[in-house]
Image: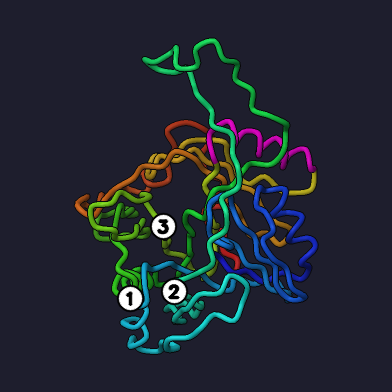
Amino acid sequence: YVRLQSPSLDEAEEFLTTFGLVRSERTRERLYMRGTDAPHHIHVTELGPSRFRGLAFYVDGEDDLRRLARAPGASGFETVDEPGGGVRVRLTDPLGYPVEVICGMQQLAPLPTPALVLNTGSDKVRRRGEFLRLGPRGPSRVKRIAHAVLMAPNAAETVRWYRETLGLLASDRVYDGAPDRVVAWFTRCDRGERFVDHHTLLCFESPVAGLNHVSFEVQTFDDLMMGHEHLKKAGKYAHVWGIGRHLLGSQIFDYWEDPWRRVHEHWTDSDVLNASATAGLHPIEIGLSNQWGDPPPEEFVRHAVP
């Protein structure tokens, strides 16, 4: 999950609900939002001045946490005294942001989602005699949190820490000018032979540290488009970029700002890799390109919210 701080929990919940998350719990000082998948929450908002409060990563069991508890600066093994529960170890990354590593969070019943059958490609009769109906218009149905992008004055050191501490693997690297001038690292979880998202954490070289965006998977391309229309119809949130399809990672994407300029992304259809995949190396012109859709706005490429 991502942990943010916002001056109004009411406004935060209104945006996140319009974006396609669902409240799982709310206290006087914190808001917990879930997706359609089982985890109790994937987004936490704390009451206070606008601020990025860090990221949390899941591990399979307490053995991983006990190993992490021995890392320099680790909090030690502790019980989570928040809705959703579980146990965790807290660390601080090289940018000064808190990092939580957690297991044992409460799992809720998955929320129902429509199963769409598409007549596409070489199989154009899958939906034999059936009509495609997407259901009532409304927000996207966010499944889960997918990745975050951090801007870092020393991105190489930040990536090294995440890779050495959490075991992340490099999927793609992007250089500016010469191959030895790497400015961006796409990293993914190491799940052995299991296939995972192309990236879970992207670090980009920047003069200012901060959160560029946080990303959430939605059900389908239709679901993404319905969510786009719903956010647009609300008439109060800034559209940042999209709709398009990335080259690195290959996701179809759509980016929106919350009331405090924290960018939230909808995506669907990512590349997946396992631990045997080797890291790519690309010039920045390739690294920031799309397979279709408008190029990224210059402001978004530099965007960093502390």
**Residue 98: x and y, percent?**
51, 78
Q: Which mark is residue 79?
A: none
Q: Are marks 1 and 2 in contact (CB under 8 Å)?
A: yes
Looking at the picture, which amino acid does disc 1 mark? Asp
Left/right placement of residue 43 relative to residue 50 reads: left
Label 1: how many residues lie within 10 Å, few (<14), some (14-19) or many (20+)? some
Where disc 1 sits, the SS reads: helix
Front residue of 253/140: it is: 140
**Residue 265: x and y, percent?**
57, 49
Q: Is residue 226 magenta?
A: yes
- The residue lying at 74 percent from left, 49 percent from top is 237
Label 3, label 1: how far apart the Cα atoms are:
19 Å
- The residue lying at 56 percent from left, 74 percent from top is 85
Q: Is residue 208 in view from this perspective?
A: no
The earlier-in-sequence mark between 3 and 2 is 2
**Residue 278: x and y, percent?**
21, 51
Tell me where the magenta segment starts and ends, as one range: 219-234
Whether 127 is drawn above or below 288: the answer is above
Residue placed under numbered mark 3 in the picture? 200
Residue placed under numbered mark 1 in the picture? 64
> In which quadrant is the C terminus drawn?
bottom right
Label 1, label 2: how far apart the Cα atoms are:
9 Å
Q: Is residue 296 in view from this perspective?
A: yes
Magenta portion: prevailing SS class: helix
Residue placed under numbered mark 2 in the picture? 101
Looking at the picture, which amino acid does disc 2 mark? Val
Left/right placement of residue 78 relative to residue 241 reads: left
Looking at the picture, which amino acid does disc 3 mark? Thr
**Residue 29: x and y, percent?**
74, 76
